[in-house]
Amino acid sequence: MYPELPIKIDVFAILMLLGVVQGFFLAVLFLTIQKGNRLTNRYFGLLLLAMSLTSTEILLGYTNYMFHTLYLDDAAEPLDFVLAPLTFLYIKAYLDEKFKMSHLLHFIPFILYLIYMLVLVYPEGEIYKYNSYIDSFHPEMKRLPYHHIKEAWYYCFRNNVNELMFWQLLIYLVADFIMVYEAFRKEGLSFFSSQNKKLTWCRTQVISLASIVIVFLIAKKMFQYDLGDHIIAAHISLIIYAISFSVISRSGFFHENPSKTLKKYEKSSLTADIQDNTLTKLVELMEKEKPFLDSTFSLPNLAKMLSVSPHHLSQILNESLGQSFFDFAAEYRIKEARVLLSSDQNNHLKIEEIAERVGYNSKSAFNTSFKKIVGVTPSQFRAQY
């Protein structure tokens, strides 16, 4: 029997435990769900699984339960090298890039480190694992006598695993940022815009990875060895719960009951064919004739152009586009404003003049709509060009 310490349960332990349980639940959900983009779901499920397994090992070490499960010491350590690649590949897939065999090259560091651990570290005896554990979590305890049969340099990679992981996280963070920033730029949007929900979600993943890098750096600088790993695991737990909240809010569970929308238009004479044809005409009209540039642009006027009733047009906008007339008009006006603001030929125009050209009578209304859709003010957007 080796010297050991009693089980420790505190706020950090509970937070980590809750995060681990929730993480495993979400991982199974994303790995087994058949709806949506299966590739992105698999990547996200594997990422959550890796996070949960890594946090489980930290939880065992922090609560002193590792004294009873020494065979699990550092079992999840190779998974440190899949967190950043899986985040990168998940974002790539979420941005509609298809799987390529070359993507597997991102897992070379993980595979090499796993082989290294399987050959040189995992076969070591229980005393080695005991010493390894107390070195990381209880350096004040006395090591047990152990004769190393391998040369000291065999352990150089393991002794520098924190540095290796930090640099990998940092490199992938930069790559993630560039990839998402370019995706925003191609859409003509600011990186801080919330107009495109897909890009907003990708940006959230970049911010999450950045937060892990920052917390990782702080924990390793403030604490020796792995004494601060509980802070990293607790932070990962918070990220997992933030993901859970986002998944629930995006699922439609709390959204307006579809039956209420149907009830609202249950007496409508609008057929599916008329709705589809009108929507096609609407898009063509907005793109070619741009009636929204007129400050008197209104729902009745637009309905008259399309030869439909205002009620039917409102129904089409609500059911087909999920927008009100005002949101619909603002989207086209701001899109046109972005074109004008990004052109050097219009540098002489004031913001008020741009607002008037796209159909706004009020500069404040223009600024409000622009910032809501693009994420920055018109002046800030112009400064980017």
Image (cartoon, rainbow, N blue to C red):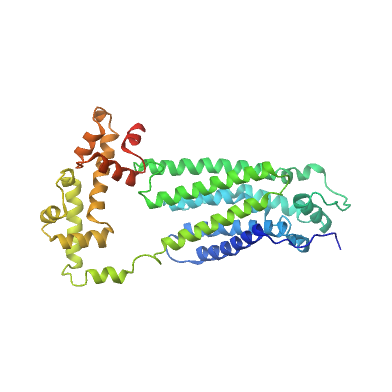
Q: Position of residue 345 (x, y in %)?
A: 24, 29
Q: Position of residue 91 (x, y in %)?
A: 47, 50
Looking at the image, the residue that sits furthest to the top is: 348
Q: Position of residue 288 (x, y in %)?
A: 17, 45
Along the viewing direction, whichever of 89 and 17 lies nearer the viewer: 17
Residue displayed at 17% across by 69% down: 268
Observer able to see residue 385 = no
The quadrant of the rendering that contains the N terminus is bottom right
Q: Position of residue 193 (x, y in %)?
A: 38, 45
On the image, which quarter does residue 14 sit in?
bottom right
Along the viewing direction, whichever of 78 and 17 lies nearer the viewer: 17
Observer able to see residue 338 = yes
In the image: residue 163, left or right of residue 151: left
Along the viewing direction, whichever of 272 and 2 lies nearer the viewer: 2
Along the viewing direction, whichever of 88 and 310 lies nearer the viewer: 310
The quadrant of the rendering that contains the C terminus is top left
On the image, which quarter does residue 322 sit in?
bottom left
Residue displayed at 55% across by 46% down: 211
